[in-house]
Amino acid sequence: MADKRSTVTGDAIELTLPVGLGLPRAGFGTTIWRFCRRKPLGAAGGLLTLAMVVTAVLANFLATQDPIATDAVHTLARPSSQFWLGTDHLGRDIYSRIVHGARVSLIVGVLSTLLGSVLGGIIGLLSGYFGGRIDLISQRVMDILQGLPLLVLALVMSASLGPSIQNVILAISIPIIPRAGRVIRSSVLSIREMQYIEAARGLGIGHLRIAFRHVLPNTIGPFIVLTTAQLGSAILVEAALSFLGVGVPEPYPSWGRMLSVSAAEYAQKAPWLVLFPGIAISLAVFGSNLLGDALRDTLDPRLRGG
Amino acid sequence: MSLVIFVLLRLAPGNMVDILFSTGGYVSESDKAAIEKELGIDRPIWVQYVDWLRDMATGKLGKSYRYDLPAWELIKPLIPVTVELAVLSTIIAILLGVPTGVISAVRQDTSLDYVLRVFSLAGLSMPSFWLGMVIILALVAWIGWIPPITYVSPAENFKIHLVQFLLPALAVGYRSSALITRITRSALLEVMREDYIRTAWAKGQSGRIVIWRHALKNAMLPVITVIGIEFAFLIGGLVVTETVFNLPGVARFLVQAILWRDYPIVQNIVMFIAIVVVLSNLLVDLLYGWFDPRVRYG
């Protein structure tokens, strides 16, 4: 979405970056505090995202049961003090599976977003900086990749590559490439015309060095905005793929897989099978969307949306 | 485009014959080779690709490996289901998205604005297939209504048919409406700052006329762009939704064909989706000129 509206100029980034996150000028704590006060929704999103990261890291301590072990005695158990969110048709503890699922979702989400954005970013950088034939060819390839809905492309890719975590990450990252490429390219196009680039060229610095040392660091604003915005959709796509049975394979507990057809069969008898994993997905995506929006407003005022 | 789809599919480890074998028990190697030869998948990939291109140009879309029927005949009856669902979802998305966006913009930074923004962002965050499952569950729990398990055509029972389509359309439409809300809000906020809006207020025109006639009309351009882009997303969303609601549409068939490695079907459906997306983008471009006469195509 952002790519259609991203007429970012170098000015905007330079003016706004000092107020941005994590830059040493204002002190880290102060910056965070200021961000929270100005963007309460964004701070809530940050908290949700942080909670997900903590859950993923501490999954082993937070889980009360083995997320994979089946238990023939306690199948489809109601939520209770022993099984906080109930059990599924194989007697696996839903709460523990959700806690461990955070790990899978986060790893797949973050890695595929990063992979897609970095590859797309490099393509965008080169095609924006050099222009000409490289630009033309890479933009047409991007057009083709963008002609398909994200989920359809990821679905075809993931089915082609076969089920494994690495392949799911790859499959989700490919549809992200053109989106990242567009955003970075458009901001490179304006940075390229800045005076300090001209100065660098005047000093006789090589093109590749200018592209990576002088242009690239200035695209960091749109890059952060882009990756946070894509993280949510990457998590959603992973859930959908796993739901359809071409995503993260067993035995890894994945939120999408927990919702899959086998869970739907028992949904009437055990609604907790459907409710809780879905809530987990929604909260995770909601958090990263809120955070992404707030970051976009802070780092990139020109893209301000709803 | 076609090349990309084709090569991606052929990367798949295992083909149709392997799947037949794993479900059908043991079959001798020579049988396997014979079947592969009959289906033409023993030849080099590029030969298969050239074949496919020639077939497409001459209107032959290939045969399904699994059903041994022409792909087009299998896909054709499924198209109306998906189109109906897509159109219904889009209508719901617009009906839900544009008014909420307008209200949100007019009441900017009030608590109502915050509520609506959170509401629309929540729509973006929920997987539509999950939302669909929850809607079914809630209906069953509260009013004891059990969704029809099989597809009901409009000729059979129009009411059941409508309900059957309305629920998934609602689940998908809510999600799409979220983006429309956001864009409507920001576009309207921008337009409201223009001079001619101030003039309209100064003329003493009522708020309703200023907002709906003067402001919204000019805020529609980005909104239409998003609706166009959304349409592509929406088709992606249908893949899962059709599966959840058990509707015999193109998208559900795509999932089945992928799991069966039925390449001709997958290729054709993916090509079909790509064409639909391109056409919807074209439609959006044409609509620009209608909404904003300043846009002219030379």
Image: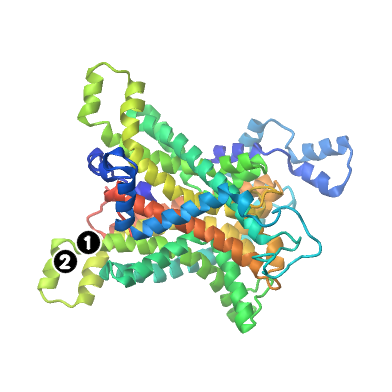
Q: Position of residue B117 (x, y in %)?
A: 37, 65
Residue lying farthest bottom?
B143
Residue at the location (20% across, 72% down)?
B210
Q: Residue at x 65, y 36 (%)?
A: B11
**Left or right of B112, for residue A85:** right
Badge 2: residue crowd in 10 Å (few <14, some 14–19, many ≥20): some
Residue B139, x across and y down, in percent = 60, 78
Q: Are marks 1 and 2 in contact (CB under 8 Å)?
A: yes
Element on which disc 1 rests: helix
Residue B191 got which mark? 1
Is residue A226 toward the left or the right of residue B139 in the image?
left
Residue holding disc 2 = B197
Q: Work out whether mark 1 precedes mark 2 in sequence or the reverse, and give the earlier one.
A: 1
Choose between B165 and A262: the one closer to the eye: A262
Report the residue at 33% width, 37% height from top. A219
Chain on which label 2 sits: B
Q: Position of residue A110 (x, y in %)?
A: 51, 44
- Against B287, residue B158 (above or below) is below
Which image quadrant for residue A27? top left
Q: Chain of mark 1?
A: B
Q: Amino acid at mark 1?
A: Val
- Picture quadrant where residue A165 is located: top right
Q: Helix, strand or loop at disc 2?
A: helix
